[in-house]
Image (cartoon, helix red, strand yellow):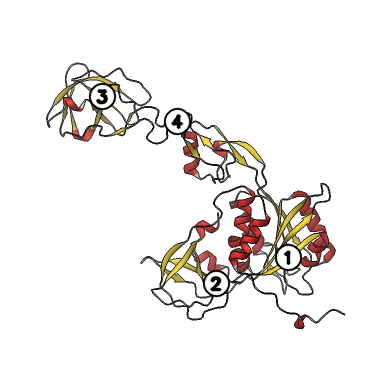
């Protein structure tokens, strides 16, 4: 006869940093890549450096509309020079003639021999034969308004490194050095399913005792934001045979399996025995609030002898969201070979009172106010998902610490955690 549940010793809770270190030590990058057109590589992780084969800009060019000339020819305001040529962007003008000026436009190559540009608002066109002349209303410094060859990127420079996640600026930088395509890590294939007979999908009748499955939508959105290929296997009935079948199906297709709910020790929680039967499993109690229970392991793939990683998240919606952001997000980035796995944190002022210290590390939903401080959502329950929509991020509050107005706290923005 098994030992009564109440008599079993509670497992020690793992600090968050230790749990994350264990996950990252176990998981290795997939090491698979593909070539994509640069325009289609947003959010992907580079698997090869991007090295510039040219200087950017490729030649000295004008930073504004105006006139190019030799500084030695304009020594005092009111100087008038004949305009010898007109140089629009995309046109290479003739060599500059001393004692003249060139009408030039933003981005146009500065004629060889000219060394200064003055913006048109500080010049006055003087009508005359040909292109007329120009009167300079001020005397600029030598080299004014000229963007020098290679001042942005020098030929041979590595502009984007392996492991970088590509944002819009990164795509533009790659394009600026002529990279039409980029080598990026293959998208991780992540299988997602929920367990629980109480779960129904939006649009279905909400029978007594049932709830709508919010975690499926939250986790799917998080995975897509991290560049994953999501295999949504839906809601699995609370039966051991159904759970085992879902795990086998997921492992056959995915690199990683994510579930929500069913990681406790209740009689209707079948994930634990199912994963143990189909692979191996560790159950961890993480010393964080919300989000204490976490399951980590692997599920065998029958067709090739390999395995898919498995992470089981808690079922409460905020606990599931927070645990994903803190522990699953770095794992997914590591699978892609990303070099920056951890979110940026900011030291900000608390404009709230949190007098009850907890023995666990707490993550409190908060948002920025107009005074530059942080306000706290009134209800910090792990089931109140509206707190995450209201908030701008999480206050990372160490165990045993209370917070008073004016204290400096560590703030993790959702802009860092959700992408």
Residue 56 at x, y = what percent? Answer: 41, 32
> Going by the image, does 46 lie left or right of 213?
left
Secondary element type, mark 2: strand
Tell us which disc is closer to us: 2 or 1.
Answer: 1
Query: From where the camera sits, is residue 407 visible?
Result: yes
Q: Which mark is residue 114?
A: 3
Identify the mark nearer the N-term, 2 or 3. 3
Extreme residue toward the right, this view? 1
Say how many tags the image has.
Answer: 4
> Going by the image, does 241 lie left or right of 388?
right
Please name the residue shown 42% across and 35% down the image: 153
Identify the mark nearer the N-term, 2 or 1. 1
Indicate the quadrant where residue 129 lies.
Answer: top left
Identify the mark nearer the N-term, 2 or 4. 4
Identify the mark nearer the N-term, 1 or 4. 4
How much space separates mark 2 and mark 1, taking CA atoms? 23 Å
How much space separates mark 2 and mark 3, taking CA atoms? 63 Å
Q: Note whether 318 is above or below 166 in the view shown.
A: below
Q: Which residue is mark 2?
A: 362
Q: Which mark is residue 155?
A: 4
Secondary element type, mark 4: loop
Residue 181 at x, y = what percent? Answer: 57, 33
Q: Note whether 66 is above or below 21 in the view shown.
A: above
Please name the residue shown 20% across and 20% down the image: 100
Residue 85 at x, y = what percent? Answer: 26, 19
Q: Note whether 228 is above or below 15 in the view shown.
A: above
């Amino acid at each position: 006869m098994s030992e009564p549940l109440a008599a079993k010793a509670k497992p020690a809770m793992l600090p968050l940093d230790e749990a994350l270190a264990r996950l990252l030590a176990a998981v290795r990058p997939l090491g698979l890549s593909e070539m994509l057109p640069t325009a289609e590589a947003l959010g992907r992780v580079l698997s090869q450096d991007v090295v510039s084969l040219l200087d950017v800009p490729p030649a000295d060019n004008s930073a504004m509309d105006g006139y190019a000339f030799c500084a030695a020819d304009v020594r005092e305001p009111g100087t008038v020079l004949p305009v010898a040529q007109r140089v629009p962007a995309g046109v290479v003008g003739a060599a500059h003639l001393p004692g003249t000026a060139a009408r030039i436009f933003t981005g146009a190559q500065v004629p060889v021999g000219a060394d200064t540009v003055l913006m048109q608002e500080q010049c006055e066109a003087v009508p005359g034969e040909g292109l007329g002349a120009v009167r300079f209303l001020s005397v600029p410094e030598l080299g004014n308004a000229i963007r020098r060859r290679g001042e942005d990127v020098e030929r041979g420079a590595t502009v984007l490194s392996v492991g970088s996640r590509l944002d819009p600026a990164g795509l533009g930088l790659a394009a600026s050095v002529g990279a039409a395509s980029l080598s990026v890590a293959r998208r991780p294939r992540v299988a997602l399913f929920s367990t629980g007979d109480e779960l129904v999908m939006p649009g279905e009748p909400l029978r007594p005792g049932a709830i709508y499955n919010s975690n499926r939508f939250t986790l799917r959105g998080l995975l897509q934001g991290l560049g994953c290929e999501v295999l949504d296997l839906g809601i699995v009935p609370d039966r051991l045979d159904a759970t085992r079948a879902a795990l086998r199906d997921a492992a056959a297709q995915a690199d990683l399996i994510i579930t929500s709910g069913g990681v406790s020790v209740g009689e209707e929680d079948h994930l634990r025995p199912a994963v143990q039967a189909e692979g191996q499993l560790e159950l961890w109690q993480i010393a964080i609030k919300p989000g204490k229970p976490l399951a980590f392991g692997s599920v065998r793939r029958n067709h090739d002898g390999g395995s898919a990683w498995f992470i089981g998240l808690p079922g409460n919606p905020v606990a599931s969201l927070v645990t994903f952001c803190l522990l699953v997000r770095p794992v997914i980035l590591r699978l892609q070979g990303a070099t920056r796995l951890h979110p940026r944190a900011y030291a900000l002022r608390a404009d709230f009172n949190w007098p009850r210290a907890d023995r666990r590390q707490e993550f409190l939903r908060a948002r920025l106010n107009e005074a530059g401080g942080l306000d706290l959502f009134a209800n910090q329950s792990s089931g109140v998902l509206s707190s995450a929509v209201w908030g701008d991020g999480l206050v990372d509050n160490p165990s045993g610490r209370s917070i008073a107005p004016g204290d400096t706290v560590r703030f993790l923005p959702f802009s860092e955690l959700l992408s």
